[in-house]
Amino acid sequence: MLAAKILPFTSPHSKLLVKSNDFAPSFQNTVPLVKFKRNSKITCLKSSLQSIVSPEIDSDSPPAQTRVKILSEALPFIQKFRGKTIVVKYGGAAMKSEALQASVIADIVLLACVGLRIVFVHGGGPEINQWLGRLNIQPNFLNGLRVTDASTMEIVSMVLVGKVNKHLVALINKAGATAVGLSGIDGRLLIARPSPNSSQLGFVGDIATGELAGIGAEKLILLTDVAGILENREDPGSLVKQIDIKGVKKMIEDGKVAGGMIPKVNCCIRSLAQGVRTTSIIDGRLKHSLLLEILTDEGAGTMITG
């Protein structure tokens, strides 16, 4: 799965951009995007806050004073990121659970309601593989990137643009915000050049004009299906909480970072080089991991710094 790359996007309104980024085909990219307008209604903020403080109202719900304390402790983080652009890459494997999907959407809506400018980039690898399987097409990967021939490209476009993107748009709208689904081909938002390995990868490429820094992103967050970067891939308890570019490159050289994690890490490295302040790879399987990463000191995965 390729890491997120986004063209400069300007508008008088705060938005969340959701882009399906399981691939980056050469020439015009058909990657789906969702433009998400921040909802100004107080009811949106209220319902979302309830979902993070007390997702299920029952006898175990925290008392009102506890909830107020939690909200007040989030204020410095809200002030820090308010008005800033945060890019969230939502990986396909982290999208499998409907409950987790609803949690991510609630977090996105809440963050937008308190003033963060969210750009939401989505994948859909598992669903693509499911549809390929129905058509007896075997998925193939090279260094974490999908090998995409013409037949695979057709399925990828259908699933990401026509199915996954619109499903996420519907969930965001249902949660009380307003989302518009876009593809990279819409308005020539994204143009790609063939990958140096195009002879092996097929219709896979690199974005030719504009990337993450073009929209002035403060932070990039990759939601995935692992806890983050592990010192020992066999030991879930060996999570690396924070590392710089030099350190993470050394981990790649040593083989500690491999497979599908390589393009994610390389995305973070490129983003930092282009001016993004911090990047994080966090566990999308953890409920409200986005809020833990943005609104607490503890975080929810690995932060990579320049």
Image (cartoon, rainbow, N blue to C red):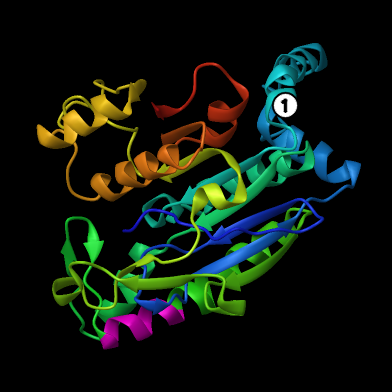
The front one of 258 and 56 is 258
Residue 284 is at least partly visible in this image = no
User: Residue flagged by tag 1: what amino acid is it?
Assistant: Ile
**How packed is label 1: few (under 14 Cα within 10 Å), some, or many (20 or more)?**
some
Is residue 94 rendered to the left or right of residue 105?
Answer: left
Secondary structure beneath label 1: helix
Q: Residue 240: image x %, image y %?
A: 30, 22
Q: Residue 161: image x %, image y %?
A: 51, 76
Is residue 151 rendered to the left or right of residue 62?
Answer: left
User: In the image, is residue 156 part of the stretch drawn in magenta?
Assistant: yes
Instruction: Return the residue at label 1.
Output: 78
Residue depicted at x 48% and y 51%: 90
Q: Residue 78: image x %, image y %?
A: 72, 26
Q: Residue 72: image x %, image y %?
A: 77, 15
Quarter of the C terminus within the rendering: top left
Q: Quadrant of residue 148?
A: bottom left
Whether residue 21 is situated above or below residue 257 in the rendered picture: below
Residue 148 is at least partly visible in this image = yes
The front one of 111 and 275 is 275
User: In the image, is residue 30 part of the stretch drawn in magenta?
Assistant: no
Residue depicted at x 38% and y 44%: 270
Magenta: main secondary structure: helix
Which stretch appears magenta? Answer: 150-158
Whether residue 82 is situated above or below residue 155 in the rendered picture: above
Is residue 50 rendered to the left or right of residue 18?
Answer: right
Is residue 291 rendered to the left or right of residue 133?
Answer: right
Quarter of the N terminus within the rendering: bottom left
Q: Quadrant of residue 142?
A: bottom left
